[in-house]
Image (spheres, coloured by chain):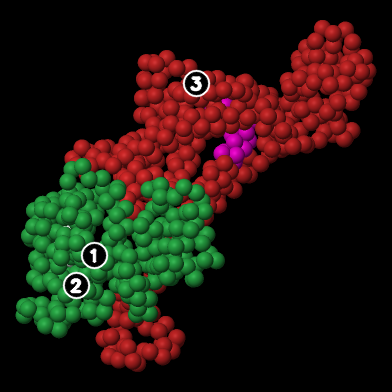
């Protein structure tokens, strides 16, 4: 085996007409040795390159599949319906009836409860809200008849996006032939269009896939990350500064150090259990709230921040500390005026990376109930909330076809945010870190 | 040496790091407004002695110091001595230039700021200018005071460190091999600077270069294995050492 590679290597060396060959590899033995060394180097490079290529391919496939699944969630089908704003119904606030009547008028062939029910299912339940908003903004419309673009139901949305399987027998699929016929009628009238799905970014969660949005979970994530950062940064950086700059080096501090490293390796679900036991059961903080979520995440990223900050502090050369000390600065002055400022880029980078980890963390939030169905967008840290990853978890678990693309879209958003956060960390490191 | 000419004096100084003793019963007088050179082979305790003079050894946990070091007749190892004030009076320049990664101006202004030496920005500006001038750096940096101190060349950085040390108006300046990281031209500039500085400051300098010791110093102390073997006037010691060991070291026979 070795001999074969050696031979190949020697052949290559000959081809290259290495001008130094005669000088360096004067004897046959030296030549063989040199050729072997080059061959080894080449093998090493090939190995490294294929490792990189493999991981790039993996990443590419991963992104491609998620984007292919998820991009369609950013558009939403709308139907143009002729709506009659009946005065008495508007006064009663019964917009649902208005919508149903208008649909009936447009498709009079729908007979019987069952067919009418199928007819109503064309338009999203959110269409009722759209009508109400329309009237609120424009009261003159009362009593008139007008063409209105209304969001299609998830069923129609999926059909329009070609995500449904229409080959199977009618009884086995949700969308019925009659509905398809109506839809085709609308399409023939140019009454079906696809628009940017703003609801996805402005709504909280919903049972109806076409109305479900990520704003609630984004707010939940922001609130819990803010809480997490406030706690973990103040405690983490404080602990790191004390341990690195002030603590005497003895058995006790060694023990603390080892345990902080151990803490960083504890599975995150255990922090969730701890948070459940302490914050919810003992202190009685509000379940599912971003406050408790932030506390749980803070415990999780605390060791990361301590370790990163200590490394950043340790990277400040002792000679700088000596310089300040010899000028007559006190220990605290040396730390506050020099060590911490010079370590700050590193500390921030570490903290941001910790926060990125917290952003994607799911398990501890499952334990403290940030995985409930929350339709209202949270407005404070005490409101029940979900976070982006738990929202993904929730949607991935939903049986409706419409949630498949929502799940992937939510993953895309989460990855984008993580990318931005990590990019910021890299930027700070590149731009501000001191090279000693 | 007459008493009034002595600025610092070490008496019976014993220093150890943990179990390892680094200095044995060291006695040395440091003359006012003169340059005292400390020479000797590597590891003989020169830096240790120098750090005893401004209590920089306090930062080393394992370091135990026994004996007396006086500044103007006052023992600096007494309990009630404020090290912060002491280090203002006794400045230090290190072997490797170690400017703060701040602007040139901030580097020099930092000491006066923490000691509250100036009352206004103009005063501080003046002090910074004066210190840079005295370190022979003003002309080179006056247009780029806001540039980071680390952007200067090695020799300029070392002069910046000297300017930083003299900005707090010390009485004594300790220099630990200040030229060992510099080329001959930068070294020459710093040697001239030392010659100039001794009018105002008392200087203690460690050097491995016998020529440098001969050129810049008035007094020399020869350390070997933690003891002072011989000390005295530089001229006399270099031309006519009392001990064979000193002669051998100066002649480069060991070291
Ligand atoms: N911080 C320290 N901890 C433990 N031992 C030390 C420490 N600093 C110095 N020593 C020891 O003290 C002895 C004297 O060291 P010192 O640095 O004073 O030598 P030096 O004369 O300055 O040498 P050089 O010319 O190489 O700088 C050496 O044996 C060294 O190992
Ligand atoms: Mg030394």
Which residue: 32% across, 78% down? A36
Q: Which mark is residue B85?
A: none
Q: Which mark is residue B32?
A: 1
From the top left corner, tell me how far across and down residue B218 is, in percent.
22, 74
Q: Distance between the residues labelled 3 and 2?
A: 77 Å
Do labels 2 and 1 touch, CB within 8 Å?
no
Q: In this view, does A216 lie to the left or right of A350?
A: right
Residue closest to the eye, A361 or A332: A332
A408 to A329, vertically: above or below? above
A330 to B96, vertically: above or below? above
Q: How far apart are marks 1 and 3 (CA)?
A: 74 Å
In reply to whether residue A403 is colored magenta, the answer given is: yes
- Chain letter of disc 3 in the image: A
- Marks 1 and 3 share the same chain: no
What chain is colored green? B
User: In front: mark 1 or mark 3?
Assistant: 1
In reply to whether residue A3 is colored magenta, the answer given is: no
Q: What stretch is highlighted in magenta?
A: A397-414
Q: In this view, does B64 lie to the left or right of A290?
A: left
From the top left corner, tell me how far across and down residue A382 is, in percent.
52, 20
- Chain letter of disc 1 in the image: B
Q: Which mark is residue A288?
A: 3
User: In front: mark 2 or mark 1?
Assistant: 1
Prevalent SS, magenta region = helix
Of callouts 2 and 1, which one flags the residue occurring earlier in the amino acid sequence?
Answer: 1
Q: Chain A is drawn in which colour?
A: red
Which residue: 51% across, 25% down? A290
Label 2 sits on residue = B219
């Amino acid at each position: 085996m070795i001999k074969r590679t050696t031979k190949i290597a020697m052949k290559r060396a000959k081809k290259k007409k290495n001008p130094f060959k005669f000088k360096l590899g004067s004897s046959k033995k030296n030549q063989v040795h040199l050729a072997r060394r080059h061959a080894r180097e080449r093998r090493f490079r090939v190995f490294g390159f294929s490792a990189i290529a493999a991981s790039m391919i993996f990443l590419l496939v991963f992104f491609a599949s998620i984007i292919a699944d998820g991009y369609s969630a950013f558009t939403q089908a709308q139907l143009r319906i002729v709506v009659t704003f009946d005065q008495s119904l508007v006064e009663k606030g019964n917009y649902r009836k208005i919508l149903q009547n208008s649909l009936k008028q447009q498709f009079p062939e729908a007979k019987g409860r069952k067919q009418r029910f199928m007819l109503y299912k064309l338009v999203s339940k959110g269409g009722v809200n759209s009508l109400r908003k329309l009237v609120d903004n424009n009261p003159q419309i009362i009593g008139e008849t007008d063409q209105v673009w209304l969001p299609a139901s998830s069923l129609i949305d999926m059909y329009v996006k070609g995500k449904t399987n229409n080959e199977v027998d009618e009884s086995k699929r949700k969308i019925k032939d009659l509905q398809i016929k109506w839809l085709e009628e609308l399409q023939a009238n140019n009454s079906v269009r696809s628009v940017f799905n703003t609801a996805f970014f402005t709504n909280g969660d919903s049972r109806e896939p076409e109305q479900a949005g990520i704003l609630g979970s984004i707010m939940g994530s922001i609130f819990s990350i803010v809480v997490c950062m406030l706690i973990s940064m103040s405690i983490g950086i404080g602990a790191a500064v004390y341990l690195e700059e002030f603590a005497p080096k003895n058995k006790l501090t060694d023990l603390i150090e080892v345990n902080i490293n151990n803490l960083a390796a504890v599975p995150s679900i255990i922090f969730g259990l701890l948070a459940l036991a302490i914050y919810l059961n003992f202190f009685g903080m509000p379940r599912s709230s971003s406050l408790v979520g932030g506390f749980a995440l803070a415990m999780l990223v605390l060791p990361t921040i301590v370790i990163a900050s200590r490394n950043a502090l340790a990277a400040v050369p002792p000679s700088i500390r000596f310089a300040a000390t010899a000028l007559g600065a006190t220990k605290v002055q040396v730390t506050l005026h020099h060590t911490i400022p010079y370590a700050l880029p590193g500390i921030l980078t570490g903290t941001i990376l910790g926060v990125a980890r917290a952003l994607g963390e799911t398990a501890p939030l499952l334990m403290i109930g940030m995985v409930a169905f929350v339709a209202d967008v949270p407005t404070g840290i005490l409101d029940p909330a979900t976070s982006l990853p738990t929202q993904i978890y929730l949607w991935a678990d939903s049986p409706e076809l419409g949630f498949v693309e929502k799940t992937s879209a939510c993953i895309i958003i989460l990855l984008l945010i993580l990318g931005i956060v990590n990019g910021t960390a890299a930027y700070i490191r590149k731009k501000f870190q001191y090279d000693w | 040496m007459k008493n009034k000419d002595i600025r610092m004096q070490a008496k019976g100084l014993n220093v150890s790091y943990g179990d390892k003793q680094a200095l044995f019963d060291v006695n040395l007088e440091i003359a006012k407004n003169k340059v005292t050179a400390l020479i000797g082979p590597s590891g003989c305790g020169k830096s240790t002695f120098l750090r005893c003079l401004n209590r920089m050894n306090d930062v080393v946990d394992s370091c135990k110091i026994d004996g007396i070091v006086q500044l103007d007749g006052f023992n600096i190892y007494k309990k009630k001595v404020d090290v912060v004030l002491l280090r203002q009076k006794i400045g230090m320049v290190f072997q490797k230039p170690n400017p703060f990664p701040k602007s040139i101006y901030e580097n020099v202004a930092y000491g006066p700021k923490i000691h509250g030496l100036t009352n206004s920005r103009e005063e501080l500006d003046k002090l910074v200018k004066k210190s840079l001038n005295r370190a022979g750096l003003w002309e080179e940096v006056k247009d780029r005071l806001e540039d980071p101190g680390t952007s200067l060349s090695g020799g300029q950085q070392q002069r910046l460190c000297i300017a930083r040390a003299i900005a707090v108006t010390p009485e004594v300046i300790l220099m630990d091999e200040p030229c060992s990281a510099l080329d001959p031209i930068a070294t020459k500039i710093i040697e001239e600077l030392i010659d100039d500085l001794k009018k105002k400051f008392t200087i203690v300098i460690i050097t491995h270069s016998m020529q440098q010791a001969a050129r810049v110093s008035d007094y020399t102390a020869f350390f070997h294995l933690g003891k002072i073997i011989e000390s005295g006037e530089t001229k006399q010691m270099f031309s006519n050492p009392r001990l064979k060991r000193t002669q051998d070291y100066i002649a480069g026979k060991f070291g």
